[in-house]
Image (tube, rainbow, N blue to C red):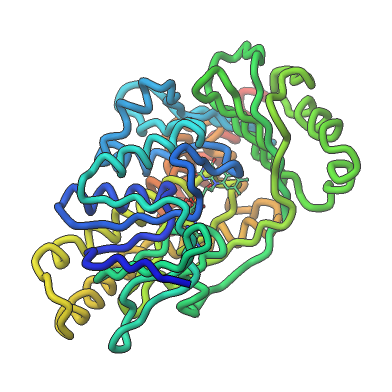
Amino acid sequence: MTSKARENYDVVIVGASIAGCAAAIMYAQQGLRIALLDARSDIRAHKVLCTHHLQPCGAPILQRLGATEKLLALGMVETVPKFWTPWGMITPDAAENSPPPGFNVRRETLDPLLRQLANDYQNVDLLLGHRVSGLLTKNGTTAGVYGTEQGSAFTVEARLTVGADGKDSTVARSARCDSVSASNGRFSYFAQLSGLERPDGESSLSWFMDPDVAYLLPNDGGISVLVVFPALDKLGPFADDLSTAFLAYANALPGAPPVRREHIVGKIVGTKHFSTTLTDPVGNGFALIGDAAATNDPLWGIGCSWALETAQMLVDATAQMLTETTSHTLDSHRNVNAALTEYRSARASMTKHIDYMSGYAGGRKFTAIERLLISAATHDHDEAQRFYLFGSRLIPAEQYLSTRSVARAAQKHLRHCLRRRSVAGT
Ligand SMILES: Cc1cc2nc3c(=O)[nH]c(=O)nc-3n(C[C@H](O)[C@H](O)[C@H](O)COP(=O)(O)OP(=O)(O)OC[C@H]3O[C@@H](n4cnc5c(N)ncnc54)[C@H](O)[C@@H]3O)c2cc1C
């Protein structure tokens, strides 16, 4: 088998989805030469297993990529959700000066646009149909990747190798990266719905039913996405007759608009045993971003924004070093590894939140502290905003769940209960 060799790239990125395209664009904006590879050969390919919510923490990065206006023109929906809980509704304020909104946009709209934006840079070589199977090493450090394209072998050499190849990353596996996995105590199914009557308008609705969770998300193209995350003990009826069980579940959601079979566009899809994985994102001469670095519970709708955030963290830690140093000397490898250590530290800021989400993914009910924070958020404006900021990862888990935060919520909730009792007594 003849081998096609490409070399002299600053960065080779494996995976041309959200994380990979975002990193390629941000590196290209700084004049670096990028090879962006994907196993799929169609530039319009998109991830099917995704419910398309972009949490607000990803919004500034979409802007940096030059994607926001284009996506809004394609129908991307700005949204601040309302939350149903057993203790009342939480309605964060969507008015001026309130927390920033997130976005809903279907992956069939988002993925091709990001890939096209990356491809528009002359210094990005988008190599589709290239399946990577391992890492090249030279002088004891990672020097690129190898794989196959239409049955022919290829190699791509670069100063920095990036795995943006999603869950069960080939790059992470080839490099034998350390990782921790946790099983999921909920399953998920979702469908795209067309023609739904929405008496509540077009806002996103979330149900935190303790322990089940569900979302209804308006998207581009007049499509709403309904996703349900029931606890695993409810899997039986879904396994027996998926569409009947899905519709029954959807129509039992408190305050949800009626969902009929004819609303469903395409297939109901989902995951039964979706484990979460946290991987060390850095090794000798390579880094992991997006799901390759951390595959989180889809329940939090955070993976896309974190794919953008980790891409940004990596580019910010390494681009300047890559532009200022050029050669393949030993020093150059040392510089790469020093910059990668900065990326590892930046990513560590997410670890507590990731641990929290993995714990909740087990399928447990809310703790007494969480019930208190949620109850306070149902009647107190500031607590509602903070609940939303936490869910959007605009404030980290350690801040939201801190003793101070819980004490403040407890005080407010106690005052609220006393006020209600005295009103009831008069
Ligand atoms: C049911 C479900 C619902 C979800 N809903 C949401 C949501 O609402 N909001 C949200 O933010 N997140 C959601 N997520 C998570 C989100 O889909 C991921 O976090 C996100 O797609 C990660 O982006 P990525 O670029 O890291 O990886 P991916 O989007 O998985 O892309 C990986 C890319 O790498 C390519 N690739 C893989 N292996 C190779 C190889 N060997 N060689 C070359 N190329 C390769 C693939 O073809 C693909 O293009 C959901 C996930 C699931 C499972």
Q: Is residue 163 above or below residue 271?
A: below
Q: Position of residue 134 (x, y in %)?
A: 46, 73
Any part of residue 419 in sight: no
Q: Nearer the viewer, residue 341 or 285?
A: 285
210 relative to 132, above or below: above
Residue 236 against residue 402 in the figure, above or below? above
Q: Residue at the spot x=31%, y=57% of the render?
A: 35
Q: From this viewpoint, is residue 43 visible?
A: yes
> Could you say which is closer to the camera, residue 52 or residue 137?
137
Residue at the (51%, 41%) spot, across then down: 46
Farthest residue to the bottom: give it.
139
Locate residue 341, reporting x and y percent.
28, 74
**Residue sticking out furthest to the left:** 324
Residue lying at 44% horizontally and 41% vertically, measured from the top left: 43
| Residue farthest along the front direction in this orientation | 2
Left or right of 102 in this view: 117: left
Relative image position of residue 259 (x, y in whole percent): 74, 20
- Camera-nearest residue between 45 and 401: 45
